[in-house]
Amino acid sequence: MLPTEFQSALSSLDGRQGAMTERTLAWSAINSGTSNTEGVRRMVGEAEVAFTEAGFKTERVPPSPVTLVNSKGDETPVERAESLLMSANPGANRRILMTGHLDTVFPASSHFQKPVTRGDGSLHGPGVADMKGGICVMLEAARAFLRSDYGESVGIDVILNADEETGSHASADLLASQARKADIGLVYEPALPDGTLAGARAGSGHYTFTVRGLAAHAGREFDKGRNAILGAARLMLAVDELNGVRDGATINMGVIEGGIATNVVPDTCIVRINVRARRTEDLRWVDEEIRRVHLEAKIGEGIEAELHGGIHRPVKEMKGGTEALFNLVRSAGADLGIGIDWAPTGGCCDGNNLADAGLPNVDTLGVVGGKIHSDQEYALPDSFEPRAKLSLLIMLLLASGKAPWPERLKV
């Protein structure tokens, strides 16, 4: 049952759906694909203004250096925008870390740019669910909490990073450092279309093989060439033998780049691989085995391979303080008439990083929506206000002492 002293704070969110959806549509119209740093910085400015008005002090945090292997096999620096770090009540002993991301998967060249409200009332546009709508939910919940009777009793820190969709490589250090200072994490990825939350999450790694051979004319000097694409194929087949050895551990050969013409023996081939595993020991095993195969595989005389990358999203398990926090979310949802359930997923997000730093967190507290990462992405407006109230109630229950704080995770 809802404590009566929370009614005023919760009722302050009544009627806020329109403001949240209006802001979501406005932000969706700003292209902020990760590589579009100008657009992401526009979003940084928008969020900076909104959270300052809500009572936060804001700071722009420069990105950590990031390099990627290009199609020629060379490591090259990649530009990323700054992240936002925002805080309220810096002197409080207990701290809640709220996180979200300002980037989307849609580049500046995408045909999917203009958000609309569909005839059924749903919002349709880039990032409306993932996760500009979620940031609006976070903003409303945080503002309402800071204006409540308990608003000065708990510190609130907010990270809005600029590169979650590409793995948070430029913001991983920021996430980890703030996670170590907090007691719980609330992350605003969208819930599943039926409202289900993501529970345990698989861990993930990205690897790039740069395979080098020797170019030659395919007609005149074929025998003098050393075919990098064939070497890459042999290497991929050797790596693929790891699939099926450990239950739930998968290795996907995702991208291959090589060759310039059919009459040239290719001297370079790039192979990009993604791995997933649901258990920490399996993710470590995959990493070790890929490195072993790299050293031992017979890929052809005169052909060499370089390996880049590794694990970047550790496994997030449903245990300890994380499980306790999920149960609190379920209880808070019941008080609000919201059914809460969760299920394991093979997807990853910043919740993985927070858990790896010892922070119990729920990472799908954003809006209800679906078809994310496609031009059919949508968000359900009727979910905005209930989800904001859910986050607010979680914070009120912890701040008031009516719910125990979950224990940090052992790492």
Image: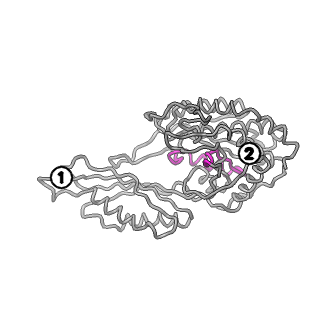
Q: Position of residue 393 (x, y in %)?
A: 78, 45
- Name the secondary structure under disc 2: helix
Residue 322 picture location, percent across and down: 69, 57
**Quarter of the figure with the C terminus:** bottom right
Which residue matches tag 2?
390
Q: Earlier in the sequence, mark 1 or mark 2?
A: 1
Percent position (x, y) of residue 318?
65, 61
Magenta-drawn stretch contains 186: yes
Give the residue at mark 1.
216
Q: What is the span of residues highlighted in magenta in the rendered image?
A: 164-193
Along the line of sight, the residue nearer the viewer: 275 or 121: 121
Give the residue drawn at x 80%, y 39%.
10
Three-letter residue code for mark 2: Leu
- 299 relative position to 205: left or right: left
Q: In front here: 270 or 372?
A: 372
Classify residue 238 by image quadrant.
bottom left
Residue at the farthest right position: 4
Say if 140 sits above or below 276 in the image. above
Q: Amino acid at mark 1?
A: Ala
Q: Is residue 319 magenta?
A: no
